[in-house]
Amino acid sequence: MSAYLGIDIGTSGVKALLIGENGETLGEATAASREPVRPHPGWSEQDPADWWRATLEAVDALAKLYPDAVASVRGIGLSGHMHGATLLDRDDNVLRLAILWNDGRSAAECAEMEAALPALRLIAGNIAMPGFTAPKLVWVRKHEPAIFEKVAKVLLPKAYVRLLLTGEHVEDMSDAAGTLWLDVAKRDWSDELLAVTGLDRSHMPRLVEGSQRSGELKKELIERWRMTGEVVIAGGAGDNAASACGIGVIRPGEGFVSLGTSGVLFVSNDRFRPNTAGAVHAFCHAIPDTWHQMGVILSATDSLNWLAKITGQRAADLAGAAEAGFKGPGEEIFLPYLSGERTPHNNAAARGAFVGLSHLSNPARLAQAVMEGVAFAVRDCQRVLEDAGTQIGRLLTVGGGSRSALWLKIIAANLKTEIALPEDGDFGGALGAARLGLCAATGAAPADIMVMPRIKTVIAPDATLASAYDDAYARYRALYPAIEETRS
């Protein structure tokens, strides 16, 4: 029997998951990373050495807990947080802390890129946003020219871990699509997009599909983990595409809503479907000849965690109190732009707000407002995906927020769509990565491996709530331009 390993590199830590030939989970382990540092407001940086240390710790723990299964590993897949700029010199030394996905310093550079290359959105299929990788390099060129001159390779977080696993500079299509250097329709680096940032193809890793072989595990690591035989490393996927592989969302029209730190509305497509006017992310999927769209909001469960911190309560207790007192849409409205926003506003400077407070406002009501505000933000994402011609059917749900029955009820009512909650299990990036590792090692067809999980319950949209939320959503939509006008 062979096993397959998925490694999910997150900003808070690394998760390693073992699966068997039939996709069953054999074991898992995690290791924490140090928190990102924020040297200035809106900045977010992390030491790539933390990702590698946590990767070694997680796989070491698996090898100790499940030695026989780890010995039989034949394929490894990687998942990672997207957009992070890891800058290497000609000897593969890291030149500075990696600039992460939630770093907003490069807003001016985004405007400069679009002015310098009017065809940028047409080629990339996406708006230049501070979260993407390319604008970060323009910022480095402008503010840290000595470092920029030494840059020989730019790698995304999981590609840096891959380099240390294999010695190869390789990236998969789904993660590469989030750099703003990829011609997403052609699934190839764009010379024009690279040139506008002062780079060329020599600075980029080699491209592969996520289900294809990208290299082999180094001999010293095979010995460290007492593996036997060759171990293939798959191209892998960016974290959202990996989650889609983990939950089986790879066929056109299939989608999921993720309620994690950030929020994602993800839909698979059979072709490239951009909508830059709505700040939709249109990326390559992790498997060949497939693309996907995402609406991304930056503060989903992070919004409820923020409320918990300032009220001194646990987020789960706040959610429970909101559910106990729920009678329909609340008077209070929350804008969840605590870290700026991507879809649909593309505004790193946007900030959150409570509106409609009264003497009756209490932590439970504010918690409901936070949950509704996140649901309205997801509804914004649905609106602009539909503007791009995408029809969304039933959505699966993943992430910590999916443990709240009320939150799912509110989202179903707002999207007017069934929300399917899988049976308990891990369907995240580590599982998707492991499945990609299996495909790369065995040649199995992704459609045969990326199956959907059993469903525990389906939340149907409540028609009476849906009409009430139409009015509340209209109030929500009117608030953003009004508040931005007062900030200008």
Image (tube, rainbow, N blue to C red):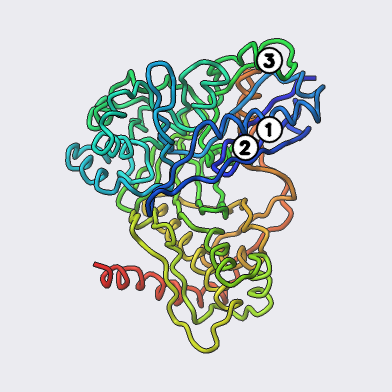
Residue 149 visible in this rendered orientation of the protein:
yes
Say left or right for 196 vs 352: left
Q: Position of residue 92 (x, y in %)?
A: 44, 19
Task: Look at the numbered disc 1 and give the secondary structure of its residue.
Answer: helix
Three-letter amino acid code at disc 1? Ala
Callouts 3 and 1 close, C-beta under 8 Å:
no
Q: Are marks 1 and 2 in contact (CB under 8 Å)?
A: yes
Residue at (41% x, 59% y) in the render: 383
Q: Does 259 sit above or below residue 224? A: below
The residue identified by callout 3 is 222
Tell me the residue that label 2 is attached to.
Answer: 14
Q: CA distance from mark 1 to mark 2?
A: 7 Å
What's the residue type where badge 3 is placed?
A: Ile
Residue at screen point 74% across, 12% down: 228
Residue pointed to by mark 1: 58
Q: Where does residue 258 sit, x and y in percent of width and height?
A: 56, 52
Mark 3 closeness class: few <14, some 14–19, many ≥20 residues within 10 Å: some
